[in-house]
Image (cartoon, rainbow, N blue to C red):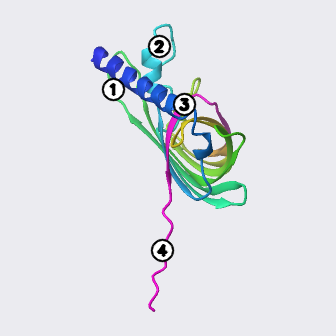
Amino acid sequence: MRYLTILTASLFIGLLMANVLNAQNEQDRFLPPGGYKVMGFNTTPLLVQLIPFNRSDPRVVGPYYVNWRSYVQKNDKLKGFKISLGVDLSDVDDINPVQAFFNFRLGFESYRRISPRWGYTRGFNGFFSSGDFNTPGSKPNNDVFLGVGPHWGVDFFVSPKVSLSLETALVIGTAGFGPKFEFIPPVALNLNFWSPKRERQVISNE
């Protein structure tokens, strides 16, 4: 199993490097004007297990495993909405503690380019959490958390259609019968795939 993981990671890193080399002379192709759909995956669980000197818990990798964004062009920005989902249900045994959570958020986001490869995001979300936010220091609980708050992030394009991103968020809400404040640190490294939206064609009856 370990050799399969190493092989998968090597292939993943090799593909990224190939994309970087292939994109060196294609900076003009990064995000042409238009709308985009973006699917992102949390790669931190894989990276944590591959770094030999790392002592981090491979299960504590941020609240969301999948992020989906939909953008439309608004002047010099991309604007749209974002959906994120994270689920973990671990088996109960005598050695490892139970790891169980469900995290969901829905909100809007804007993206602005800083350079051909760099951009930053910001937005505002509604949050739902059951268990915890799966971040370092968070303590599992049985309360359902509901909240709202802003988030900020950065994207780096390794190719015209692939980017890596980090983000952080502040959340104010309620859990149980009292108020609660949460800070979600940038512990998750997301791999994102950008796909241009197809323009709708108007069919004429003439």
In this view, the mark in front (3 or 4): 4
Dot 4 amino acid type? Gln
> Mark 4 falls on what kind of element?
loop
Q: Cβ–Cβ below 8 Å for labels 2 and 3?
A: no
Dot 2 amino acid type? Ile
Residue under label 1: 92
Residue under label 3: 189
Q: CA distance from mark 2 to mark 3?
A: 14 Å
Dot 3 amino acid type? Leu
> Mark 2 falls on what kind of element?
loop
Q: Residues within 10 Å of mark 2 (few under 14, many from 20)?
A: few
> Mark 3 falls on what kind of element?
loop
Q: Earlier in the sequence, mark 1 or mark 3?
A: 1
The magenta-colored residue range is 180-206
- Magenta stretch contains residue 187: yes
Q: CA distance from mark 1 to mark 2?
A: 27 Å
Q: Earlier in the sequence, mark 1 or mark 4?
A: 1
The mark total stands at 4
